[in-house]
């Protein structure tokens, strides 16, 4: 009996290709997706960057020879040291004050919550320059400070004009302002910790102070660190305002030298700019490693360091070049 039309053909009778393909699939190269828009934007950005760099190098108005002269002058380095001292003291005192204010804001006492909220509201509303100038003229309001019984006799009195040095005014003013912002950073970090962590610590019968120091605060630091380092960078730049309370920091020194040497105003400002860039960049590097440290246990793999990124990029480039050479 003959097969009907359209019947299936057995595998033995199926036609087989006689000519193999010229290239195997493994040898074929996948062409990347063309992105003309990205290449156009990249070219425009590179042209703009090249123009900016060319202007910085060739414009005689910047006076790079005078910049080199002033960059490491002892006067400028003394002002830089003052900036570092003010920033360091203010950062520590501001963070301590911020932690205390955050704890007061999270406490069960209505009085502590009200005082903390009022302090934060006040110092976040008043400009820093107003706080510094107010403290600079504080001796006109209170010539002496005393410790004793409230509304009663004083045991110890201090002459405010002798205690309020320029350095003390700068540190106190920046610390008071920094504490208000740090309080919100710390409070937000504490609130970011999962409520189950608090409940588990309370179920173990751990004291509240121990819970905060060993369980809650270390986890909150993952959220606090980037935000507070951002505040710290702002604090370093805010130290330039202490010039208005007669403290010669980096900016104050540059400003003073600019008045003495009017022809060097631009190179002196560039000196201050570069030093501020160096300080903030150093803080950013420290921030990266602190965040990487507190990321342990929260991520499966730690973020690579810049050295590891460069090494991986070099390895990928070598592998790509070898693959292209083999093809």
Image (cartoon, rainbow, N blue to C red):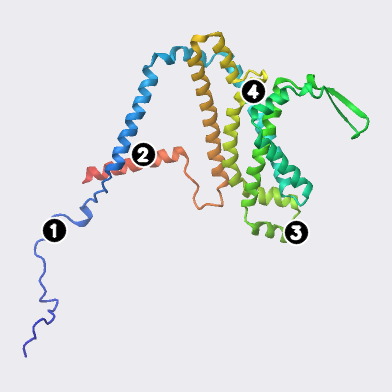
Q: List x then y, in percent, for residue 248.
A: 63, 17
Q: Which residue is mark 1?
A: 21
Q: Mark 3 against mark 4, which lies toward the viewer?
A: 4
Mark 3, other Cα within 10 Å: few <14 / some 14–19 / many ≥20: few
Looking at the image, residue 304 lies above or below residue 135: below
Q: Is residue 49 left or right of residue 124?
A: left
Instruction: Specify which label sits upstream in the sequence, 1 or 3.
Output: 1
Circles 4, 2 touching at the beta carbon (< 8 Å): no
Alpha carbons under labels 2 and 1: distance apart: 35 Å
Seen from this angle, which residue lies furthest right? 153
Instruction: Specify which label sits upstream in the sequence, 4 or 2.
Output: 4
Q: Which residue is mark 4?
A: 242
Disc 4 secondary structure class: helix
Instruction: Specify which label sits upstream in the sequence, 3 or 4.
Output: 3
Q: Is residue 311 left or right of residue 32?
A: right
Q: Mark 1 against mark 3, which lies toward the viewer?
A: 3
Q: List x then y, in percent, for residue 276.
A: 53, 26
Circles 4, 1 touching at the beta carbon (< 8 Å): no
Looking at the image, residue 243 lies above or below residue 261: below
Q: Which residue is mark 2?
A: 314
Q: What residue do we see at 91% from left, 29% from top?
A: 154
Q: Mark 3 against mark 2, which lies toward the viewer?
A: 3
In front of the other: 189 or 240? 240
Mark 1, other Cα within 10 Å: few <14 / some 14–19 / many ≥20: few
């Amino acid at each position: 009996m003959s097969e009907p039309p359209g019947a299936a053909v057995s595998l033995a009778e199926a036609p087989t290709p006689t000519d193999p393909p010229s290239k195997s699939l493994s040898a074929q190269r996948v062409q990347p997706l063309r992105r003309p828009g990205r290449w156009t934007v990249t070219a425009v950005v590179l042209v703009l960057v090249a123009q900016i760099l060319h202007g910085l190098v060739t414009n005689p108005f910047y006076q790079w020879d005078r910049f080199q002269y002033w960059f490491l002058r002892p006067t400028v380095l003394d002002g830089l040291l003052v900036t570092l001292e003010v920033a360091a003291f203010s950062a520590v005192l501001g963070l301590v004050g911020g932690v205390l204010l955050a704890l007061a804001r999270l406490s069960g006492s209505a009085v502590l919550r009200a005082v903390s909220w009022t302090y934060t509201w006040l110092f976040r509303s008043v400009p820093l320059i107003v706080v510094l100038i107010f403290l600079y003229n504080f001796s006109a309001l209170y010539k002496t400070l005393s410790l004793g019984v409230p509304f009663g006799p004083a045991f110890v009195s201090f002459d405010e004009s002798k205690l309020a040095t320029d350095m003390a005014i700068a540190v106190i003013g920046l610390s008071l302002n920094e504490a208000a912002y740090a309080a919100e950073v710390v409070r937000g970090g504490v609130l970011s910790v999962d409520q189950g962590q608090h409940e588990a610590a309370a179920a173990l019968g751990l004291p509240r102070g121990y819970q905060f120091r060993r369980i809650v605060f270390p986890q909150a630091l993952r959220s606090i660190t980037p935000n507070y380092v951002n505040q710290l960078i702002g604090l370093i730049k805010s130290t330039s305002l202490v010039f208005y309370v007669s403290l010669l920091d980096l900016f104050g020194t540059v400003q003073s030298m600019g008045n003495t040497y009017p022809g060097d105003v631009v190179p002196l400002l560039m000196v201050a700019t570069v030093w501020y860039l160096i300080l903030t960049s150093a803080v950013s590097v420290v921030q990266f490693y602190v965040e990487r440290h507190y990321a342990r246990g929260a991520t499966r793999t730690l973020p690579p360091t810049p050295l590891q990124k460069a090494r991986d990029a070099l390895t990928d480039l070598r592998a790509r070049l070898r693959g292209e050479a083999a093809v």
